[in-house]
Every structure is written in structure tokens, then in C-alpha cells.
Image (tube, helix red, strand yellow):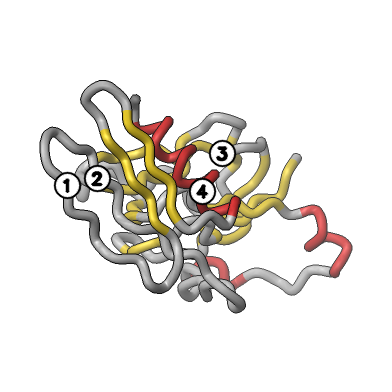
Amino acid sequence: MNIKDIQNLIKFVAKSGAQEVKLEMEDVKITIKTGPDSQPIETTGFVQQIAPVQVPEAAPVAPAAPAPAASAETPETDEADDKLITIKSPIIGTFYRKSAPEKPAFVEVGDTVKEGDVLCVIEAMKLFNEIESEVSGTIVKILVDDASPVEFDQPLFVINPS
């Protein structure tokens, strides 16, 4: 089982509303608990443990303030806003706009991206996961500051598809 399979399992459990899911394979045991009363899991043997997933109950997580460059935009009509695509975090982790501190950011507001282009990386459990664009278009807003923690399904970018 690779990290993508685990991420997909976490997404599925969070959306299903299940309180607890256990998966045992040859040398891997995974338990995912959701809800506010989730407790850490104690196990023995070789175990791959996933942290409890916190699912928002009523109010969605408020995104961080947009990047300064985004504030220079002119207001758009509601019709134009309906066409915008929001790229959301597929995992919980730390959001990074660059691959390394001395490297340039993957994307800036106003950049044109193609489907599959890397927008950022999210560090989760010491692994850096590249987040790719789901659509081609222009970056309208970057909703998270560099090196900020992000939640599952938190909006990261707003893209105007082309």
C-alpha cells in the first residue's frame, strides 16, 4: 500500500461519515478514526498508523488571508466567479509554495498553468506530496501562506479555467 492509497482511504473515510475504519494486510495495519472524540491508537508489531481525521461539523475552515498580489485585482461579476475552479488540499499537512527555500515559487498570481503542472507541495508524515493542477487556466488567488498548516479539503488556489 503506497501513500496515494492511504490518502484515498482517508478521503473516503472522511466523506463516508464512518466513525472508525480498520484495515489489516500482511504486515500493515491501519486504523482511521473520525470525529471529535477520536483517541490515539495503541498497537503492537509492525504498524503503519494514520492520525485521526477531524471532519468539520458545521462551519468550513476559514482560509488564510490571500497573498498580497491578489488584493490588487479588480472586483469581478458573479457570473465570472461561477466559472472559477478552487483547488483544495487532498491531505492534512504543511503547505509549501517552493520545493526548497532558495528555489522560486511553483506558481504566482497571474501565472498560466496546464493540467498536471505542480502548484505546491504538502508535507505530511515527512513525505512531500506534489499537488498538481486539475485544470488549465490562470492562477487568480493563492489562499494559503507559505509554510502554513492545511486541513483536508481546505481551499488552496483559485484558477480561472481557459
Instruction: Using the image as rendered, state which of residue 27 and residue 152 is in the foreground.
Output: 27
How far, Cα to Cα, is label 2 from label 4?
Answer: 15 Å
Instruction: Using the image as rendered, state which of residue 101 and residue 95 is in the foreground.
Output: 95
Q: Position of residue 35 (x, y in %)?
A: 45, 67
Identify the residue at image location x=52%, y=72%: 61
Identify the residue at image location x=37%, y=36%: 23
Which quarter of the rendered picture does the N terminus lie within? top left
Q: Position of residue 33 (x, y in %)?
A: 39, 56
Q: Position of residue 9 (x, y in %)?
A: 46, 39
Frontmost of labels 4 and 1 is: 1
Frontmost of labels 3 and 2 is: 2
Residue pointed to by mark 4: 13
Q: Amino acid at mark 3?
A: Ser
How far, Cα to Cα, is label 3 from label 2?
Answer: 29 Å
Taking the image as drawn, is residue 77 in sight? yes
Q: Amino acid at mark 2?
A: Gln
Q: Amino acid at mark 1?
A: Thr
Residue pointed to by mark 1: 43
Earlier residue among tags 1 and 2: 1
Residues at circles 1 and 2 in contact by the CB criterion of under 8 Å? yes
Residue, far right: 79
How far, Cα to Cα, is label 1 from label 2?
Answer: 9 Å
34 to 11, vertically: above or below = below
Instruction: Using the image as rendered, state which of residue 162 and residue 20 is in the foreground.
Output: 20
Frontmost of labels 1 and 2 is: 1
Residue pointed to by mark 2: 49
Earlier residue among tags 4 and 1: 4
Earlier residue among tags 2 and 4: 4
Residue pointed to by mark 3: 133
Q: Amino acid at mark 4?
A: Val
